[in-house]
């Protein structure tokens, strides 16, 4: 398994990491087998969170004997100093270790929350105190919104970021990944197989590798069988300036498939590069969510995402199916104009919704 340098942490992380969310659904013995299999296959980066059920406990139990050969990143979902102090202590206990490699502020999806967590009395203070006391080596941050992570990097406080990125979710590539490279911040990728838009998750695979999408258009993009799809999806992500990708793994088979993709990883062929190339331009929705809520209940970001699948990614049938699943369609727009001034990219949302409705309802 190849390793890459994780930005200024200088840690060498396996290009395939372990996303620990789904092992909370397994019993302890099964979960230990899955985690230990990952370690045996050369995965050395394990990402977990206090909010992911008992994932920390299971990873702690599975890796206890090889702790020094692993890099463990966990998260605090608390926003205040006092609450996150409890999180750090309980994470150390649950992970059966006296040191966390990385503690990440978890799910900071808007600037207000970022300010709270990084301001006086916020959870960042706890992380820094824990680092000063030798309980934590590095501090990271996770978000579904690349725009928020750009602001986080600008504070200079974070060593790593964890962000969604996949063949149909590329906002991170616009500003965040180049900035992270420039500032030597380590980038880890979550959701290599699923795209989250507001409250809606559109999956290439859902929620884990074992439930692959049968969507013919996705197969045409990624490959005909499960392993080829996984390989292509991971190859796309790993072709970017990122250190590691952390698919959520919940069985030994999934570990083997993901690990094999990592072992066999080669840079994209020109044929694949062409297949994956899109021309999104600057007129696309970045899914920042700042235009919401719409008084009519339209999930603007979701409509525009599905329209981008139609117009930019060449996935028209899938886009229509996804649009059909939306309860409130763009036709409900009354053109009240509330959304447009809130869009930081000055997108003509009303006319974009009109075009989406026209294309996706056909
Ligand atoms: S203009 Fe349309 S989409 Fe925008 S807030 Fe008003 S009703 Fe919602
Ligand atoms: S339309 Fe603009 S404000 Fe709304 S989610 Fe997209 S980029 Fe953000």
Image: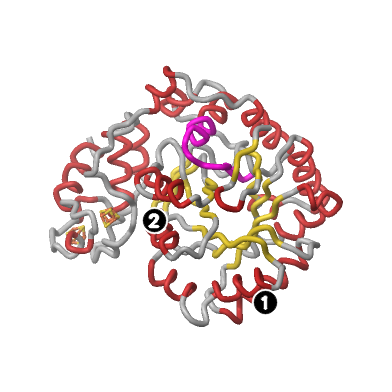
Per the image, the residue denoted by label 2 is: 198
Residue 284: which quarter of the image?
top left
**Magenta-colored span:** 233-248
Name the residue at 17% across, 63% down.
Answer: 341
Image position, residue 65 (x, y; %)? 86, 51
Query: Which quadrant would the C terminus be assigned to in this image?
Result: top left
Decide: few, some or many residues near mark 1? Use Cα within 10 Å; few <14, some 14-19, many ≥20. few
Per the image, the residue denoted by label 1 is: 86
Against 259, residue 295 (above or below) is below
Ligand 2 found in image quarter: bottom left
Instruction: Answer with left or right where residue 170 lies relative to residue 121.
Output: left
> In the image, is residue 246 part of the stretch drawn in magenta?
yes
Image position, residue 309 (x, y; %)? 33, 37
Can you see residue 201? no
Image position, residue 158 (x, y; %)? 52, 61
Instruction: Answer with left or right where residue 263 lies relative to residue 313.
Output: right
> In the image, is residue 217 part of the stretch drawn in magenta?
no
Name the residue at 43% across, 65% down.
Answer: 155
Name the residue at 50% across, 29% down.
Answer: 214
Decide: few, some or many residues near mark 2? Use Cα within 10 Å; few <14, some 14-19, many ≥20. some
* Spatial CA span between label 1 and label 2: 30 Å
């Amino acid at each position: 398994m190849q390793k890459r340098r994780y930005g200024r942490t200088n840690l060498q992380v396996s290009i395939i990491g372990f996303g620990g969310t789904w092992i909370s659904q397994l019993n302890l013995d099964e979960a230990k087998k899955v985690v230990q299999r990952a370690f045996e296959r050369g995965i050395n980066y394990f990402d977990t969170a206090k909010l992911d059920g008992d994932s920390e406990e299971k990873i702690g139990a599975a890796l206890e004997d090889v702790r020094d050969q692993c890099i463990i990143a966990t998260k605090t979902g608390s926003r205040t100093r006092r609450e996150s102090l409890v999180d750090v202590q309980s994470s150390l206990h649950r992970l059966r270790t006296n040191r966390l490699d990385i503690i990440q502020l978890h799910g900071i999806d808007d600037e207000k929350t970022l300010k709270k967590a990084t301001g006086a009395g916020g959870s960042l203070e706890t992380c820094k105190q824990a680092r000063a006391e030798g309980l934590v080596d590095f501090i990271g941050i996770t978000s579904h919104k690349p725009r928020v992570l750009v602001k986080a990097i600008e504070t200079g406080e974070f060593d790593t970021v964890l962000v969604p990125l996949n063949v149909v979710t590329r906002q991170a590539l616009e500003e965040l990944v180049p900035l992270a490279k420039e500032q030597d911040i380590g980038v880890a990728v979550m959701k290599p197989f699923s795209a989250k838009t507001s409250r809606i998750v559109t999956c290439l695979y859902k929620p884990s590798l074992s439930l692959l999408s049968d969507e013919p258009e996705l197969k045409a993009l990624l490959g005909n069988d499960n392993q080829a799809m996984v390989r292509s999806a991971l190859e796309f992500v790993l072709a970017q300036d990122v250190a590691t990708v952390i698919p959520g793994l919940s069985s030994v088979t999934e570990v083997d498939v993901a690990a094999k993709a990592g072992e066999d990883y080669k840079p994209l062929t020109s044929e694949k590069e062409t297949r994956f190339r899109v021309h999104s331009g600057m007129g696309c929705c970045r899914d920042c969510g700042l235009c919401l809520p719409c008084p009519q209940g339209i999930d603007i970001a979701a409509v525009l995402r599905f329209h981008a699948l139609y117009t930019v990614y060449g996935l028209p049938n899938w886009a229509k199916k996804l649009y059909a699943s939306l309860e409130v369609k763009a036709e409900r727009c009354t053109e009240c104009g509330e959304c447009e001034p809130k869009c930081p990219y000055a997108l003509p949302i009303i006319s974009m919704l009109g075009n989406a409705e026209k294309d996706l309802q056909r």
